[in-house]
């Protein structure tokens, strides 16, 4: 099955914003382009309507004074305007007066032919289009009036036609260039705005969501100690708080389920052990008491008779009987396991008691070296747990260590206790035979043992006590080198009344 690919949310939103801005730019460009020609025509039309008034007044004034050279100078000056294709005066015969227009050198034949073809002897404004030109052409005839009699004798007849031509293409081109600049500016602005929005989206949305996503991954890995801290002051921060509340609720529910599961196992175990104990009590304990009483009498008789050999054999019987009684008692303690009756224990005083107990066990095993080390600040180092249960943990692990180093010339047992800021670490280290890897996975199982005289319940009881007190136990072992049992228990940091 192909792994589904996911697209980054920031990329999605950024692309959507960029596409929206790009579409807006295209629509604006289309709108501006469609209005360029209309606006160009309107500008040219207004320009053409305004320009003749100025020329007309100047011509009338100059003609009244009989100053033809001034008229010629004005027309040539106005013809230099880049927006004006040309200003011409047609004579009464319908031909351009060359003294007012240098068309022979400035204008191409297409232009000259066009204005001749559209020549009118009445006032008119025409839009003219050719293969290469688009312009507004204005024609205005002048009749011989009194002010013109100084130079003209034909009263009332047309003595000339003023022609002004304004280039539409040039103005349209200029406006199109401005439109292009506007569109390019909008595109650049859109890119910058998209980049800025992308950054803001990343900081305000994507990055906080990635933090929440990582938190969900940790929860999926059964890590319920995750806590997300976001200060966005919006819905995402609220989402993070609900996420933390959900994880806290899951942690509580998980703890309740574990407790229920442990209790169910314990009930099931009690049922099995109860049946076993009923049989043991009936079948073994009564005969065992009889054996122990009779051996005591026999031992007393041997002492009285001075029979040392028989006395030693009787003592062996008593030792084995005591071992059987211990097995029965240990099984009874296991069936009566309870996590209640906790108390606040001063670790330093407790370790002194454990050391005294351990050395009493080893009084006849001088070949075993016992070393107890303390690490960390021990001032006020306390733990809240059932003292009986904690002693049971130490007794089981110390006895296991003694059994592991039994018979070694350099046998040693180390008990290292480290007081950390929020936890206490106990290490039971021996240089014994070690535990095979395939056995390490089973040593905490109930009734599993590698000892001939073991019951397989010691380490099971140890783990159950540690788990019930929110602790953790680890085993590190190598055959022929030794074994280390490492226990983590939470340090008590509250008040004595908590």
Image: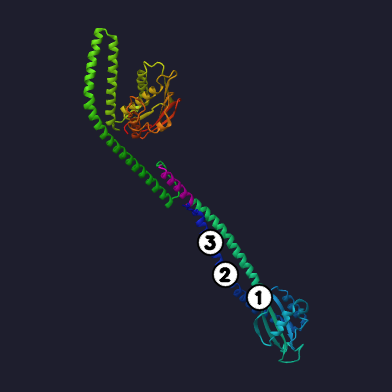
Label 1 vs label 2: CA separation? 20 Å
Q: Which residue in the structure is indicated by mark 1?
A: 168
Question: 454 and 159: which one is in front?
Answer: 454
Of the two numbered discs 1 and 2 on the same chain, state the one appearing first in sequence.
Answer: 2
Q: Position of residue 50 (x, y in %)?
A: 65, 78
Q: Is residue 221 magenta?
A: yes
89 versus 269 height, above or below: below
The answer to whether mark 2 and mark 3 are in CB contact below 8 A is no
Question: 231 and 101: which one is in front?
Answer: 231
Q: Which residues are magenta?
A: 205-222
Q: Which residue in the structure is indicated by mark 3?
A: 19
Of the two numbered discs 2 and 3 on the same chain, state the one appearing first in sequence.
Answer: 3
Q: Could you tell me which secondary element the residue under label 3 belongs to?
A: helix
Question: 490 and 409: which one is in front?
Answer: 409
Residue 60 visible somewhere in the drawing: no
Label 3 vs label 1: CA separation? 35 Å
Q: Position of residue 216 (x, y in %)?
A: 42, 47
Q: Which residue in the structure is indicated by mark 2?
A: 30
Q: Position of residue 346 (x, y in %)?
A: 35, 26
170 versus 269 height, above or below: below
């Amino acid at each position: 099955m192909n792994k589904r690919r996911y697209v980054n949310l920031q990329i999605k939103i950024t692309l959507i914003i960029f596409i929206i801005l790009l579409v807006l730019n295209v629509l604006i460009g289309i709108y501006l382009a469609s209005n360029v020609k209309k606006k160009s025509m309107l500008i040219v039309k207004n320009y053409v309507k305004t320009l003749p008034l100025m020329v007309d007044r100047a011509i009338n004034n100059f003609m009244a004074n009989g100053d033809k050279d001034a008229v010629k100078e004005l027309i040539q000056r106005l013809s230099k305007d880049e927006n004006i294709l040309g200003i011409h005066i047609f004579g009464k015969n319908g031909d351009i007066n060359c003294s007012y227009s240098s068309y022979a050198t400035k204008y191409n034949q297409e232009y000259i032919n066009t204005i001749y073809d559209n020549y009118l002897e009445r006032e008119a404004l025409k839009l003219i289009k050719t293969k290469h030109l688009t312009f507004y052409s204005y024609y205005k005839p002048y009749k011989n009036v009194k002010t013109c009699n100084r130079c003209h004798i034909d009263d009332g007849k047309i003595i000339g036609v003023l022609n002004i031509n304004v280039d539409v293409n040039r103005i349209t081109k200029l406006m199109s260039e401005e439109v292009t600049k506007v569109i390019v500016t909008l595109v650049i602005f859109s890119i910058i705005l998209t980049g800025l929005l992308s950054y803001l989206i990343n900081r305000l949305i994507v990055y906080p969501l990635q933090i929440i996503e990582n938190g969900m991954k940790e929860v999926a890995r059964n890590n319920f100690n995750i806590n997300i801290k976001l200060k966005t002051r919006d819905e995402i921060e609220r989402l993070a708080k609900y996420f933390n509340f959900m994880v806290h609720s899951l942690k509580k529910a998980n703890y309740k389920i574990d407790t229920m599961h442990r209790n169910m196992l314990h009930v099931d175990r009690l049922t099995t052990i109860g049946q076993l104990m009923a049989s043991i009590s009936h079948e073994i304990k009564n005969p065992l008491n009889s054996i122990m009483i009779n051996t005591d009498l026999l031992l007393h008789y041997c002492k009285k008779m001075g029979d040392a050999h028989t006395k030693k054999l009787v003592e062996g019987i008593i030792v084995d009987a005591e071992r059987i009684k211990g097995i029965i008692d240990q099984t009874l303690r296991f069936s009566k396991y309870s996590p209640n009756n906790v108390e606040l224990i001063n670790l330093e005083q407790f370790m002194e008691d454990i050391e005294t107990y351990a050395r009493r066990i080893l009084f006849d095993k001088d070949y075993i070296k016992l070393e107890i080390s303390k690490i960390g600040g021990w001032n006020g180092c306390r733990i809240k747990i059932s003292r009986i249960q904690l002693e049971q943990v130490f007794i089981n692990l110390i006895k296991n260590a003694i059994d592991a180093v039994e018979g070694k010339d350099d046998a040693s047992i180390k008990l290292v206790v480290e007081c950390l800021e929020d936890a206490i670490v106990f290490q039971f280290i021996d240089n014994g035979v070690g535990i095979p890897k395939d056995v390490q996975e089973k040593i905490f199982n109930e009734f599993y043992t590698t000892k001939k005289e073991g019951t397989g319940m010691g380490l099971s009881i140890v783990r159950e006590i540690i788990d019930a007190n929110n602790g953790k136990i680890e085993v590190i072992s190598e055959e022929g080198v030794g074994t280390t049992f490492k226990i983590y228990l939470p340090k008590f940091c509250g008040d004595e009344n908590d």
